[in-house]
Image: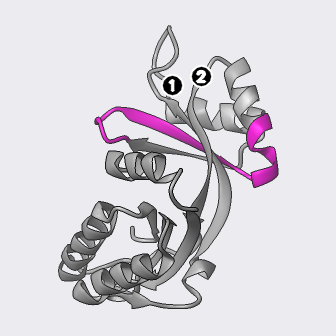
Amino acid sequence: MPKSSIEAAITGGDKAKSSYLLYEARGPGGSSLLIEILTDNAKRSFQEIRRLLSQHGGMFADGARHSFEKKGVVTVSKEDRSSSPVSLDQALELAIEAGAEDVQEEEDEEGKMILKFICAVPTLRQVREKLELLGLSSISASLEFIPTVNTQLTDEEMERTSQLLEALRDCLDVVRVYDNIV
């Protein structure tokens, strides 16, 4: 989440009531997008998102949400353990023991390797606590939209989609953008 969005939410908190919105959209190449918004002016946000989508080859589309499933996600640092980094095989064993459905290895914004343990929404707290008992301290635990249907894009479509995603993430009211691009 951009720092400007956080500051705007804090300073604007006293003046106006904020609304949470979730927009469904299609990007270039038929990719599905879910755009989380936190705003004090829903009409302005809608118009800004519509402008960005049309400018970069996207559009609002009902049904994009069906390409995603809401899941609990516990994020831990791969190098968290004092002894040695956690391998993907070890992470899978820990995931099974903690009650998670899956584990993904990713790189964060700073280039550090992280592990994301994915679980059902009702078990999020239980999985986080169990992982901490197993020696992995969580960086975050949240609800996220995980893609169930992935879309493969051509190089040209990927370039246009990258520009769209960057423009959306730079928008003041956008909290997070989920996509189903592989």
Please name the amino acid that badge 2 sits on. Answer: Ser
**Residue 139 shown in magenta:** no
Q: Which mark is residue 137?
A: 2
Kindly report the distance in space between the C-alpha atoms of the residues bearing marks 1 and 2: 12 Å
Label 1: state its secondary structure: loop
98 to 66, vertically: above or below: above
Q: Residue at x 24, y 82 (%)?
A: 157
The foreground one among 147 and 37 is: 37
46 to 94, vertically: above or below: below
Q: Residue at x 26, y 65 (%)?
A: 166
**Residue 117 shown in magenta:** yes
Disc 2 crowd, CA 10 A, few/some/many (<14, 14-19, 20+)? some
Label 1 vs label 2, nearer the camera: 2
Disc 1 crowd, CA 10 A, few/some/many (<14, 14-19, 20+)? some
162 to 75, vertically: above or below: below
Of all residues, the one furthest to the front in this rendering is 15
Q: With 172 as the anchor, is 115 left or right in this view?
A: right
Please name the amino acid that badge 1 sits on. Answer: Val
Q: Which mark is residue 78?
A: none
Q: Which mark is residue 86?
A: 1
Residue 147 showing in the rendered view: no
Which residues make up the magenta segment? Answer: 108-126
The foreground one among 51 and 117 is: 51
Q: Position of residue 90 (x, y in %)?
A: 59, 29
Q: With 165 as the anchor, is 6 left or right in this view?
A: right
Q: Position of residue 5 (x, y in %)?
A: 39, 53
Q: Position of residue 125 (x, y in %)?
A: 76, 37
Q: With 86 as the anchor, is 49 left or right in this view?
A: left
Q: Residue at x 67, y 57 (%)?
A: 71
Tell which circle, 1 or 2, labels the residue nearer the N-terminal end: 1
48 to 54, vertically: above or below: above
